């Protein structure tokens, strides 16, 4: 039987809020800035940017739900409906974010791999259908526990939460009384395994594979450009232009590698640690699990921001706006100084 008052949930919640609130606020504000840039610039109103806008909206929702995702690892006293909402809704937002991220990477991958057929992609011709694909399946899968695929009535998890460290006997539980809400009661083991190894891990591997393929194609194109440049210049040694190209490519590889290490590796570690605890059926260390969950999920939510900030068409309008505001502030400061003199 399960005790709802284990591992001091109050201190666990305080630790979660202390880690996730600053990170969540930064993610929300950064997404809002990029969304406003796309919405206010008519030149960015095209299908690729609409896909990226959908990703930003999903990432914004993930930022809002970020403090609630680690809370799913704590035992709380909630009713059946409240427990479902507290677990199903954050899981839906996370899966929608992941599906949108795969769609954006796929759209940009086709743009580089097959540029001649890029404009004839089915996702460009049927944009509403593409949006439905990245939002509807996550909602359907995340809602499966609400349609009966849960452990709420399982005899091993059917205890009532007590006010102390002892659990109330099952015979004394009232029908409407709050019960111990935990992810184990909402998500069966089969549901977790299917989500991790059937949805999440294949999506991450697909993104990594497409990114590696793009870098490989870029490397081949760079070699062709250098070979053509040498044939035109009739030289056997690399010129300064070739060295600059190689240096730029090296920087790109380093940036992609560091982004993967910083954004994806923490989440992969957190995911497999959770699976290891689930298989061994052992009690988790509260502080370790909370830190892993907050850093893992938070680092993954930063990926769209890295994609947006690395694109000049999103950063230049914001930079120009900040420059105008700075110039206005300087002019006002100078005018006030002249008046005071």
Image: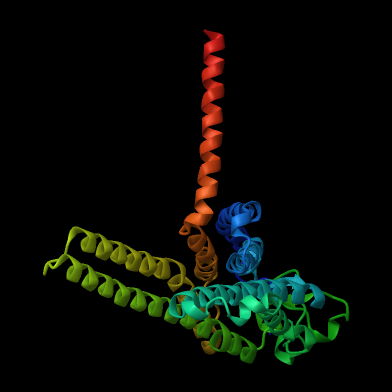
Q: Does residue 219 show up?
A: yes
Residue at point 48% right, 61% down? 306
| Residue placed furthest toward the right | 175
**Residue, x 59% and y 56% (percent of image)?**
43
The colour scheme used to paint the residues is rainbow
Left or right: where does residue 172 sit relative to residue 244?
Answer: right
* Foreground pick, 200 / 107: 107
Q: Quadrant of residue 167?
A: bottom right
Where residue 304 sits in the image (x, y, percent)?
53, 64
Q: Spot the residue most to the left.
A: 236
Q: Nearer the viewer, residue 157 or 19?
A: 19
Left or right position of 282 against 222: right
Q: Is residue 300 above or below residue 196?
A: above
Where is residue 250? Give x, y as percent: 29, 66
The N terminus lies in which quarter of the figure?
Answer: bottom right
Q: Residue at x 49, y 84 (%)?
A: 276
Count of marks overlaid on the render: 0
- Percent x, y of residue 171: 84, 86
Could you say where residue 19 lies in the image, as x and y percent from the top left?
55, 58
Is residue 9 at all visible to an observer of this figure? no
Residue depicted at x 30% and y 62%: 248
Q: Is residue 294 left or right of residue 243?
A: right
Left or right placement of residue 113 versus residue 250 in this view: right
Image quadrant where residue 256 sits: bottom left
């Amino acid at each position: 039987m399960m005790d709802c008052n284990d591992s001091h949930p109050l201190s666990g919640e305080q630790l979660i809020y202390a880690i996730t609130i600053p990170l969540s606020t930064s993610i929300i504000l950064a997404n809002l800035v990029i969304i406003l840039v796309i919405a206010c610039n008519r030149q960015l109103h095209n299908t690729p940017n609409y896909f990226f806008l959908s990703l930003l909206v999903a990432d914004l929702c993930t930022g809002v739900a970020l403090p609630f995702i680690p809370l799913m690892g704590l035992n709380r006293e909630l009713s059946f409906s409240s427990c479902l909402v507290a677990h199903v809704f954050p899981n839906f937002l996370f899966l929608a974010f992941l599906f949108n991220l795969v769609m954006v990477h796929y759209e940009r991958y086709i743009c580089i791999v097959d540029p001649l057929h890029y404009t004839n992609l089915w996702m460009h011709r049927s944009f509403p259908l593409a949006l439905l694909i990245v939002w509807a399946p996550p909602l359907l899968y995340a809602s499966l526990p609400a349609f009966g695929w849960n452990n709420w009535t399982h005899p091993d998890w059917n205890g009532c939460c007590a006010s102390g460290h002892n659990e109330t006997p099952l015979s004394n539980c009232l029908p409407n009384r709050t019960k111990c809400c935990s992810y184990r009661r909402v998500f069966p083991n089969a549901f977790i395994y299917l989500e991790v190894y059937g949805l999440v891990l294949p999506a991450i591997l697909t993104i990594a594979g497409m990114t590696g393929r793009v870098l490989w194609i870029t490397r081949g194109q760079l070699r062709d450009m250098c070979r053509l440049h040498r044939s035109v210049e009739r030289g056997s040694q690399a010129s300064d232009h070739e060295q600059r190209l190689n240096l730029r490519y090296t920087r790109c590889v380093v940036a992609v590698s560091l982004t993967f290490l910083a954004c994806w590796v923490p989440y992969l570690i957190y995911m497999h640690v959770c699976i290891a605890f689930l298989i061994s059926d052992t009690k988790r260390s509260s502080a370790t699990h909370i830190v892993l969950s907050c850093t893992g999920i938070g680092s993954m939510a930063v990926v769209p921001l890295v994609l947006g900030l690395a694109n000049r068409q999103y950063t230049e309008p914001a930079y120009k706006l900040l420059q105008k505001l700075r110039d206005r502030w300087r002019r006002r400061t100078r005018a006030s100084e002249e008046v005071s003199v």
